[in-house]
Image (cartoon, coloured by chain):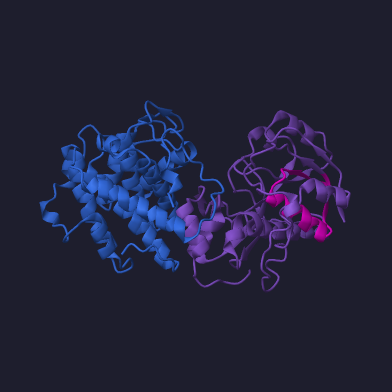
C-alpha cells in the first residue's frame, strides 16, 4: 500500500488531513516504509550543506541521542540504529553552541510580535536554545506561533510581517521546513506535547513528498536522515505507550 | 417538549443527524431549524459518504448509559427527521453560517439561542457572533484541557478517554463558559469515532444541557477556566491510527 500523504508534491498541493480514512495497520506500515525508504536515499547521498548546518546536525544528533537514552524513553537503540549512529557521539569534539550563534541575530527573548521576523534566524535561534536546554516560555511561544502559521497555511515563509500573521517572501525554502522539523522534534521530546509531533508528521510528509535531489540542494542529507529517524522514533514512542506495534526492528 | 427560545442552524452532517435524533428521542425539540445548503456529489466535511438506502451504520452495544445516543441513524437526512417530528425548518442555499444570507435568516428569527452544527472546519466570524443571538455549540473534547480540532483523538492517546463539552461560542476558539462537560470511555469500535461516536458523545452532552435548561429555565455555567488547556490542530492519520488501534485499558464514563 502506498503512503498516500507523500504521493503528491505537498508544497504545491497541501493536504488538509480532514476526515482521513481508517486503513488499519497497513497505514502505519506504509508510513514506516515511506520514511525508511527516504532515509535510505539520504544515507547514500553526500552532504552538500554548509558548515553551520553540518555543526547543527552533529549537535542535534548528540542531544537527541542523550534524550532517547533517558530511562523514561528507554528506546535508544532503535533511534541510534535508524540514525546510523554507530556509537555514542563524543560531545567534546563538537563546536560550541556559542560559535553557532549568528553575530547579527536578534536574541530570541528580545524579539517581539511587533517586529518583522526572518524565519531562518528565528528557527536557528530557537534550535540553539533547545540544544542548550535553555527553553522557557518565550521560546515555546515562538514555536507555538510557528505551529499555528504552518497548520493554517501548510507553508513556511521566508519572513513574517509584524504581528506574525502574514508571511512575506518565498514559501519554498526547504531548509526552513527542515529546521522547523528539528525544532518540533525537540519541542515534543522535552514537553511530551502531542501537538508538536502532530505538526512534525505533516512537515515531514511535505519534505518526503519532494524529490530527494531537490531537498538536498538546501538540506544536508545527514540532516534529513536525522530528522526522519527522530520522527520515526517519536512515533514509535507513542505507539508503544498505546500498545501498538510500529515494527521498527 | 418544544423549546420555544431555542432554534438550530444545521448542515446535514452526521453530527447534526445525531443531534436531531437525540433531541427527538429525549423530547427536547428546537422551535425551528435553518438547514444550510449542501452540494450534490462529493460530501462536505462532516458528511457521511453513502445513501440513506443503506440504512443505519451498525455499532456494537455498549455497557452502561454513556453511549445511549450512539444508535442513531447516521444515514438519515436531517430533513427526514424534521418532517417526521414536525419541526419547522427552512433550507438556505448557502453553506456557511458566515454568509450574509444566513446571518440575515438568523436575525429574522425570534429565538435567542441557536444550537450550531455546521460543516467541519468553519469558524464563526465576528459578524455572526455579534448578531445578537447566542450560539450553543458542543465541542468534541473535554474542555478546557482539549481544545481545537479532532481533540478526542489526542485525548484517546493521552488518557484513554473521549470528551464533549457544551458552551456558548465566543471570539476565542473553544473558550466560552462551559455549561456541561463529560468524559466517555473509548467505544468498542473506534473506527466509527468520526461519524458515530464523536457525534454521539456531543449529542449526549447536548441533550443533557437542554434538559438542564428546560428544568431550570436558565443556562447554568459549570466552568469558566478557559485559559488552561491545549489547542490541537487536525490530527495526522498516523496518530489517528494509533488512537484507533490502541489497546490501552479503557476508563469509565464520567
Whether residue B25 sits left or right of residue B45 in the image: it is right
Residue name at image x 45 percent, y 52 percent: A195
**Looking at the picture, does residue B140 appear above or below residue A242?**
above
Q: Residue at x 44, y 45 (%)?
A: A5
* Residue B11 lies within the magenta run: yes
Q: Residue at x 48, y 52 (%)?
A: B237
Outermost residue on the left side: it is A93
The residue that appears at 35% across and 41% down in the rendered structure is A207
Q: Where, by quadrant of the figure, is residue A164 drawn?
A: top left
Indicate the position of residue B250 as horizontal and vertical percent values.
Answer: 55, 71
Taking the image as drawn, is residue A186 in sight? Answer: no
User: Within the image, what quadrant is residue B207 found in?
Assistant: bottom right
How many labels sit on residues? Answer: 0
Q: Is residue A107 rendered to the left or right of residue B7?
A: left
- The answer, for residue B60, to whether it is visible in the render is yes
Q: How far from the left and from the top, in percent, is residue B201? A: 66, 60
Viewer-nearest residue: B37 or A141: B37
Residue B55: image x %, image y %?
A: 74, 56
Q: Is residue A72 above or below residue A205?
A: below
Give the residue at the far top of this rendering.
A169
Q: Which residues are magenta?
A: B5-32
Q: Can you say whether A57 is above or below B203 in the image?
A: above
Viewer-closest of A211 and A240: A211
Relative horizontal placement of residue B31, taking residue B46 as reference (left or right): right
Q: Image quadrant for the C terminus of chain A? A: bottom left
Q: Position of residue B102 (x, y in %)?
A: 74, 33
Q: Which chain is blue?
A: A
Residue B27, located in which quarter of the rendered image? Answer: bottom right
Magenta stretch contains residue B27:
yes
Can you tell which chain is drawn purple?
B
Amino acid at each position: 500500500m502506498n503512503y498516500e500523504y507523500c504521493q503528491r508534491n505537498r508544497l504545491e498541493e497541501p493536504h488538509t488531513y480532514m476526515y482521513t480514512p481508517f486503513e488499519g495497520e497497513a497505514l502505519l506500515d506504509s508510513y514506516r516504509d515511506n520514511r525508511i525508504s527516504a532515509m535510505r536515499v539520504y544515507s547514500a547521498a553526500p552532504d552538500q550543506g554548509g558548515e553551520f548546518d553540518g555543526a547543527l546536525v552533529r549537535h542535534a544528533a548528540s542531544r537527541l541521542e542523550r534524550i532517547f537514552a533517558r530511562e523514561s524513553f528507554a528506546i535508544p537503540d532503535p533511534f541510534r540504529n535508524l540514525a546510523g549512529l554507530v556509537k555514542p557521539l563524543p560531545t567534546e569534539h563538537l563546536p560550541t553552541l556559542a560559535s553557532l550563534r549568528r553575530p547579527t541575530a536578534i536574541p530570541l527573548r528580545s524579539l517581539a510580535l511587533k517586529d518583522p521576523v526572518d524565519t531562518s534566524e528565528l528557527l536557528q535561534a530557537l534550535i540553539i536554545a533547545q540544544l542548550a536546554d535553555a527553553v522557557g516560555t518565550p521560546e515555546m511561544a515562538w514555536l507555538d506561533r510557528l505551529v499555528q502559521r504552518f497548520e493554517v497555511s501548510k507553508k513556511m515563509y521566508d519572513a513574517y510581517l509584524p504581528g506574525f500573521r502574514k508571511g512575506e517572501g518565498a514559501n519554498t525554502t526547504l531548509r526552513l521546513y527542515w529546521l522547523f522539523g528539528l525544532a518540533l522534534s525537540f519541542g515534543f521530546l522535552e514537553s511530551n506535547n502531542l501537538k508538536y509531533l502532530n505538526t512534525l508528521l505533516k512537515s515531514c510528509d511535505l519534505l518526503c513528498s519532494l524529490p530527494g535531489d531537490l531537498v538536498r540542494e538546501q538540506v544536508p542529507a545527514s540532516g534529513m536522515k536525522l530528522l526522519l529517524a527522530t520522527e520515526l522514533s517519536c512515533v514509535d514512542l507513542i505507539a508503544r505507550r498505546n500498545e501498538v506495534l510500529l515494527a521498527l526492528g | 417538549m418544544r423549546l420555544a427560545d431555542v432554534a438550530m442552524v444545521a448542515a446535514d452532517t452526521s453530527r447534526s443527524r445525531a443531534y436531531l435524533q437525540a433531541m427527538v428521542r429525549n423530547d427536547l425539540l428546537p422551535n425551528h431549524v435553518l438547514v444550510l445548503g449542501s452540494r450534490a456529489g462529493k460530501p462536505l466535511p462532516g458528511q457521511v459518504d453513502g445513501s440513506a438506502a443503506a440504512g443505519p451504520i451498525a455499532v456494537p452495544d455498549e455497557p452502561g448509559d454513556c453511549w445511549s445516543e450512539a444508535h442513531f441513524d447516521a444515514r438519515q437526512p436531517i430533513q427526514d427527521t424534521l418532517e417526521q417530528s414536525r419541526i419547522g425548518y427552512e433550507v438556505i442555499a448557502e453553506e456557511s453560517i458566515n454568509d450574509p444570507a444566513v446571518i440575515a435568516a438568523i436575525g429574522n428569527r425570534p429565538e435567542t439561542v441557536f444550537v450550531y452544527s455546521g460543516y467541519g472546519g468553519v469558524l464563526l466570524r465576528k459578524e455572526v457572533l455579534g448578531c445578537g443571538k447566542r450560539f450553543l455549540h458542543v465541542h468534541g473534547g473535554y474542555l478546557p484541557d482539549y481544545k481545537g480540532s479532532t481533540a478526542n483523538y489526542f485525548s484517546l492517546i493521552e488518557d484513554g478517554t473521549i470528551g464533549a463539552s457544551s458552551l456558548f461560542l465566543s471570539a476565542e476558539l473553544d473558550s466560552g463558559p462551559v455549561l456541561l462537560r463529560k468524559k466517555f470511555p473509548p467505544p468498542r469500535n473506534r473506527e466509527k469515532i468520526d461519524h458515530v461516536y464523536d457525534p454521539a458523545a456531543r449529542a449526549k452532552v447536548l441533550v443533557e444541557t437542554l434538559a438542564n435548561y428546560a428544568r431550570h429555565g436558565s443556562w447554568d455555567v459549570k466552568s469558566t477556566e478557559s485559559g488552561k488547556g491545549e489547542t490541537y490542530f487536525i490530527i495526522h492519520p498516523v496518530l489517528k491510527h494509533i488512537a484507533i488501534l490502541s489497546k490501552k485499558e479503557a476508563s469509565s464514563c464520567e
